[in-house]
């Protein structure tokens, strides 16, 4: 199976455009346009465009995904819950990457990783259906050895480690412990032959330590970049994040 990846870099940045759509939907306008955000992010150095089609469609909508898919020059990483509706939609869209995430209707944001151990057979069936369409599957999981093992056993070639606990750890000791958890999980993923990505809650002062971990392939970042763009502009916010990640990896 071959996958399009024209921009392979030292560490890839997937720009999550969900909260461009959140801003649009807040007033029911047609701006800011997630299509424009995706294309400008690519021009500014994004290696992939990530978007999460939530079951309640609170930000990204079906029509956004359909419009953006044929226009991308990099990759689409479509995040969705493990429901038959979402898997069928992803199979119709055929993104380069399909990232399976957990979802609770009333959560403010994705609170943890997909419990692949508990829902193994459902996740494996989803992985198989997506892979039969030539879609690369990523599982968004907590940085835990049993989840990584289960993820590998589903046949998915990619995992994305949820960095939310690292991002929310405000004292130095807790942050160091969470960073170590991610570092160990990356090693475990690589040992099992997986491509290891990471993301959630990363911003301009905490992404460096994650980007510096050897073997992390890609970071997916959204909310902090949309927020920073208010002050510096969208393309500048994207390229600033990409530059700091590359600098951290090379340091
Ligand atoms: C799965 C994930 O981590 C991202 O989709 C991120 O959570 C942005 O979407 P929300 O802010 O709606 O959770
Ligand atoms: N999968 C994580 C992601 O896409 C971005 O999450 P966030 O930066 O918006 O928290």
Image (cartoon, rainbow, N blue to C red):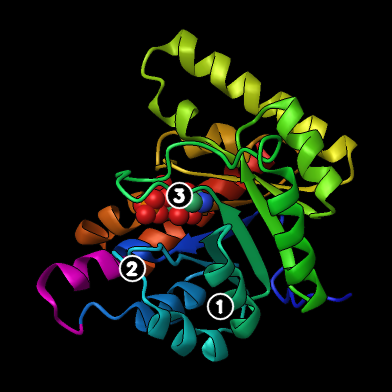
Q: Is residue 225 above or below residue 199?
A: below
Mark 2 in CB contact with mark 1 (< 8 angstroms): no
- Magenta part of the chain: 20-30
Residue 8 is drawn in which quadrant? bottom right
Question: Which residue lies at the image location 55% right of the left edge and 61% below the top edge?
Answer: 83
Which residue is tagged 3? 103
**Residue 177 drawn at (x, y percent):** 56, 14
Residue 29 falls within the magenta-colored stretch = yes
In which quadrant is the C terminus drawn? Answer: top right
Q: Mark 1: which secondary structure?
A: helix
Disc 2 marks which residue?
57
- Identify the residue shown where x is 20% and y is 57%: 231
What whole-number distance in Å separates the C-alpha atoms at marks 2 and 1?
13 Å
Indicate the position of residue 148 as horizontal and vertical percent values.
75, 36
Please tell me which of labels 3 and 2 falls first in the chain.
2
**Residue 198 shows up from this direction:** yes
Of the 4 image quadrants, the one containing the N terminus is bottom right
Circle 1/circle 3 CB separation < 8 Å = no
Q: Is 144 located above or below residue 13 in the figure?
A: above
Nearer to the camera, 64 or 32: 64
Q: Quadrant of residue 88?
A: bottom right
What main secondary structure does the magenta stretch of the protein show? helix
Q: Is mark 2 within 8 Å of ligand 1?
A: no
* Residue extending furthest toward the left: 27
Residue at figure coordinates x 29%, y 44% from the top left: 108
Q: Is residue 121 left or right of residue 211?
A: right
- Could you say where residue 178 lies in the image, as x and y percent from the top left? 55, 20
Q: Earlier in the sequence, mark 2 or mark 1?
A: 2
């Amino acid at each position: 199976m071959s996958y399009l990846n024209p921009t392979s870099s030292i560490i890839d940045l997937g720009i999550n455009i969900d909260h461009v759509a959140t801003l649009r939907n807040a007033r029911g306008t047609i701006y800011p346009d997630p299509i424009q955000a995706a294309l400008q992010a690519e021009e500014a150095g994004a290696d992939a465009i990530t978007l999460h089609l939530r079951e309640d469609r609170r930000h990204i909508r079906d029509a956004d995904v359909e419009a953006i898919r044929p226009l991308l020059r990099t990759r689409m990483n479509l995040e969705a819950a493990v429901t038959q509706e979402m898997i069928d939609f992803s199979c119709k869209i055929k993104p380069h990457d399909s990232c399976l995430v957990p979802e609770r209707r009333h959560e403010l944001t994705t609170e943890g990783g997909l419990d692949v151990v508990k829902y193994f057979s459902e996740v494996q069936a989803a992985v198989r259906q997506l892979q039969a369409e030539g879609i690369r599957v990523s599982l968004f999981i907590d940085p835990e050895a049993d989840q990584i093992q289960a993820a590998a056993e589903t046949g998915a070639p990619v995992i994305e480690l949820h960095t939310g606990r690292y991002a929310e750890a405000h004292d130095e000791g807790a942050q160091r412990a969470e960073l170590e958890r991610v570092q160990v999980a990356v090693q475990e993923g690589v040992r099992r032959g997986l491509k290891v990505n990471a993301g959630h809650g990363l911003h301009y002062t905490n992404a460096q330590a994650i980007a510096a971990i050897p073997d992390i392939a890609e970071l997916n970042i959204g909310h902090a970049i949309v927020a920073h763009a208010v002050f510096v502009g969208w393309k500048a916010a994207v390229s600033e994040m990409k530059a700091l990640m590359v600098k951290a990896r090379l340091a």
